[in-house]
């Protein structure tokens, strides 16, 4: 087992990465200070892993909330089911919430923990590659609104993250690929050596080679932990983690939550951001083609959906947490392996990307 640390003063916490971690009751017990524990999961993940977690918690008073599966249920309405269960069972402020699932459950569970009685402890048990390399680390929690992705939320850090690579055995190939989109992101924004490693090792990752996956998870978490430790609430460098997300969130919201997987939308959005970076003279054609080729090797989409026209894209991109004074601000690449902070670019250039990228 590897242990990384997210350094945030009093709110610091470990990320445990390894195999067979869901059976390690010591880890659970060392982070649960309460008697009352609520586990939040969904109808797909609970039958696979809930009993393992329950076996670690025999001496606790445990309640479970099993939500429906999918991005379309990442809403305030479904978070309310968690509050209902907590209140019905008279859970106190000293309770602990365990989020067992992918990014959807992690974001919702974390948000419920942030809000219930103004904050209870919570543990992240990420069960998708995307959640293990990104969403479970860093304390961004929240839900979607019909008008914008992740628009309601809070920064709220967990007590620990337990990333057990064994759970990825039950994850389907499409979801594994979606997780790789966020892995590639770290290489693109700040770690060219990792990007090149990914170019050379992507087939091992798709074949689920244990060593390669463990390395990719660890490198991703090292990058994420460093960024979050430096900028917890996204006043600066943390925004670079949003590479491709302004375009990507527009695709998710515009096409309807749950149609494109988050990682798929991010892959397309990153290609659009790379195209725009090329138009600014920061990337070469060769750079852009390397980026597109790596996503394609991961079986990820790289072309935006034709259902969204330029105006629809622009309107959706205008609802983004990075925007200031109603102006779209984007994360772009000033070279391969290095991202800008949020910047405004001429609208005409954004339009050129929206009109031309992926059309020929
Ligand atoms: P997800 O949570 O919907 O999980 C993907 C699918 O895999 C679901 O059907 C789920 O039930 C299933 N699943 C999960 N674990 C499984 C397992 N071990 N075996 C079999 N099936 C399993 O999607 P995701 O890709 O994990 O997360 C996407 C969400 O994360 C989005 O809502 C996105 O906005 C959010 N996100 C948040 C952050 C953050 O910093 N908080 C970062 C990136 C993404
Ligand atoms: N996934 C974006 C962030 O954690 O900031």
Image (cartoon, helix red, strand yellow):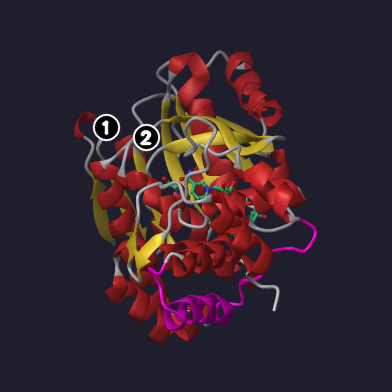
Q: Can residue 38 be found in the magenta stretch?
A: no
Percent across and percent down for residue 22 are: 44, 53
Q: Can residue 301 be found in the magenta stretch?
A: yes
Mark 2 Cα-neighbour bin, 10 Å: few <14, some 14–19, many ≥20 = many
Q: Is residue 2 above or below residue 85?
A: below
Q: Residue at (49%, 37%) from the top-left corner? A: 323
Q: Give the range drawn in magenta.
A: 281-308
| Mark pair 2, 1: CA separation | 7 Å
- 334 or 169: nearer the eye? 334
- Label annotation for residue 294: none
Q: Can residue 45 be seen in this view?
A: yes
Q: What residue does disc 1 label?
A: 11
- 95 or 215: nearer the eye? 215
Percent across and percent down for residue 319 are: 60, 37
Q: Do the residues labelled 2 and 1 touch (CB within 8 Å)?
A: yes
- Is ligand 2 closer than 8 angstroms to the Cβ of mark 1? no
Looking at the rendered structure, the secondary structure element under dot 2 is loop
Looking at the rendered structure, the secondary structure element under dot 1 is helix
Is residue 104 toward the left or the right of residue 325 in the image?
right
Compare marks 2 and 1 and give the one earlier in the sequence. Answer: 1
Q: Residue at (33%, 53%) from the top-left corner? A: 224
Q: What residue does disc 2 label?
A: 157
Percent across and percent down for residue 11 are: 26, 32
């Amino acid at each position: 087992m590897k242990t990384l640390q997210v350094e945030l003063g009093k709110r610091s916490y470990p990320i445990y990465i390894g195999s067979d971690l869901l059976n390690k009751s010591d880890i659970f017990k060392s982070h649960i200070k309460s008697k009352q524990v609520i586990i939040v999961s969904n109808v797909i993940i609970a039958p696979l892993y809930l009993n393992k977690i329950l076996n670690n918690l025999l001496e606790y008073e445990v309640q479970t909330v099993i939500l429906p599966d999918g991005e379309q249920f990442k809403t305030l309405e479904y978070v309310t089911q968690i509050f209902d269960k907590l209140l019905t069972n008279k859970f106190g402020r000293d309770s602990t919430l365990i989020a067992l699932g992918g990014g959807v459950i992690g974001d919702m569970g974390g948000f419920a923990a942030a809000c219930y009685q103004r904050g209870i402890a919570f543990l992240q048990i990420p069960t998708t590659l995307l959640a293990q390399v990104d969403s479970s680390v860093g304390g961004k929690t929240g839900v979607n609104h019909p008008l914008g992705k992740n628009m309601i939320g809070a920064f709220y850090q967990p007590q620990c993250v337990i990333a057990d690579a064994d759970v990825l055995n039950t994850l389907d190939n499409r979801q594994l690929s979606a997780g790789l989109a966020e892995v590639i992101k770290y290489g693109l924004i700040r770690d060219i050596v990792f990007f090149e490693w990914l170019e050379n090792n992507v087939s091992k990752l798709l074949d689920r080679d244990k060593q390669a996956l463990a390395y990719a998870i660890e490198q991703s978490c090292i990058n994420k932990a460093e960024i979050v430790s430096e900028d917890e609430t996204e006043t600066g460098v943390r925004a670079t983690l949003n590479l491709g997300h302004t375009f990507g969130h527009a695709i998710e919201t515009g096409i309807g939550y749950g149609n494109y997987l988050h990682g798929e939308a991010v892959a397309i959005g990153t290609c659009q951001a790379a195209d725009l970076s090329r138009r600014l003279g920061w990337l070469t054609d060769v750079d852009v083609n390397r980026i597109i080729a790596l996503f394609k090797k991961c079986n990820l989409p790289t072309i935006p959906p034709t259902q969204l026209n330029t105006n629809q894209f622009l309107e959706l991109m205008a609802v983004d947490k990075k925007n200031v004074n109603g102006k779209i601000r984007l994360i772009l690449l000033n070279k391969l392996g290095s991202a800008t902070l949020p910047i405004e670019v001429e609208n005409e250039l954004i339009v050129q990307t929206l009109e031309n990228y992926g059309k020929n």
